[in-house]
Amino acid sequence: MQIIKKKRTQHLKVCIFEKNKLVKLSVNINKIATLRNARGGNTPNLLKMASDIQSYGADGITVHPRPDERHITYSDAKELPKVIYKEFNIEGNPINKFINLVCKIKPTQVTLVPDAIDAITSNSGWDTIKNRSFLKDVICEFKNNGIRTSVFVDPNLKFIDGAKEIGADRIELYTETYASNFAKGNLQELKKYIESSLLAKKLQLGINAGHDLNLQNIEYFVKHMPFLDEVSIGHAIISESLYLGIENVVNLYLQKMN
Ligand code: PXP
């Protein structure tokens, strides 16, 4: 990858890089499990959805099993490898139960997230300095099991240096502040992500990103990030699928009824 030109966009001076690698999309299917769990039974069918999502072109499937199993259950996580033929990413807080589950399944990638048990969704990245020795041990265990490791971090250079020191293969940049600023029209926030990506690349870390990415903000993000391996997106993909699909389904009902 090589810098081909410098350009001033409307608000932000950025480098445009010649991209020779496509950014992978891993679809987080937690919300599909949430919908299924709301009724009991098996609708929507999580395994079929995972299989279809890959056949529609997604590069992988992400799940985030939480200790209370309110969306993806531990049993879902064990069943999913039967239908996953692309990349499988399991993310979560590495408590013992999670470590045992992931080492048994051996997905392509494990993403370590410091989420509290009662958090509605992930709300911050790791302090990779304070948690250095704990994370180093956990990463070592996953690597011994042949699993690629990624650490969820805010776009803060010291935590990216920290991720390198604990032996992670990749970082996942927490994109909430990019997304909320983008929604307000503030594109300057992306600067932190660009700088983080440049440092990670220099340290030979892979770069993932996720949280609150959606159809409005994804294009600008991917276009301006100099190095980006993968994004993982859940909430918006399911919400947008409802908006983009509901007209069709309402019409199908009307046709059947009349
Ligand atoms: N990355 C991590 C580490 C997450 O915890 C989540 C949410 O589960 C996501 C990405 C996806 O976020 P969203 O659902 O907002 O797309």
Image (tube, helix red, strand yellow):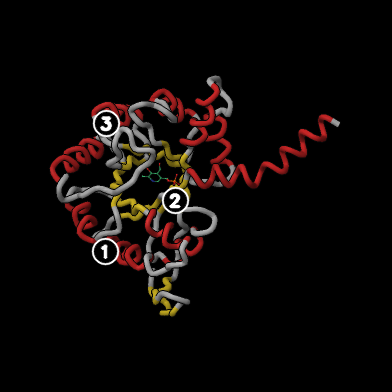
| Residue 58 coordinates in the image, percent (x, y) | 52, 46
Q: Residue at x 17, y 43 (%)?
A: 136
The residues bearing labels 2 and 1 have C-alpha atoms spaced at a distance of 23 Å
Q: Is mark 3 within 8 Å of ligand 1?
A: no
Q: Quadrant of the N terminus?
A: bottom left
Q: Which residue is mark 1?
A: 199
Which mark is drawn over residue 212? Answer: 2
Quarter of the image where one finds residue 104 = top left
- Residue, far top: 41
The residues bearing labels 3 and 2 have C-alpha atoms spaced at a distance of 26 Å
Q: Residue at x 53, y 20 (%)?
A: 40
Quarter of the image where one finds residue 67 = top left
As helix, strand or loop, the secondary structure at mark 2 comes to: loop
Q: Amino acid at mark 1?
A: Leu
- Residue, far right: 258
| Residue 75 coordinates in the image, percent (x, y) | 41, 23
Q: Amino acid at mark 2?
A: Asp
Instruction: Tell us which disc is closer to us: 2 or 1.
Output: 2
Instruction: Tell us which disc is closer to us: 3 or 2.
Output: 2
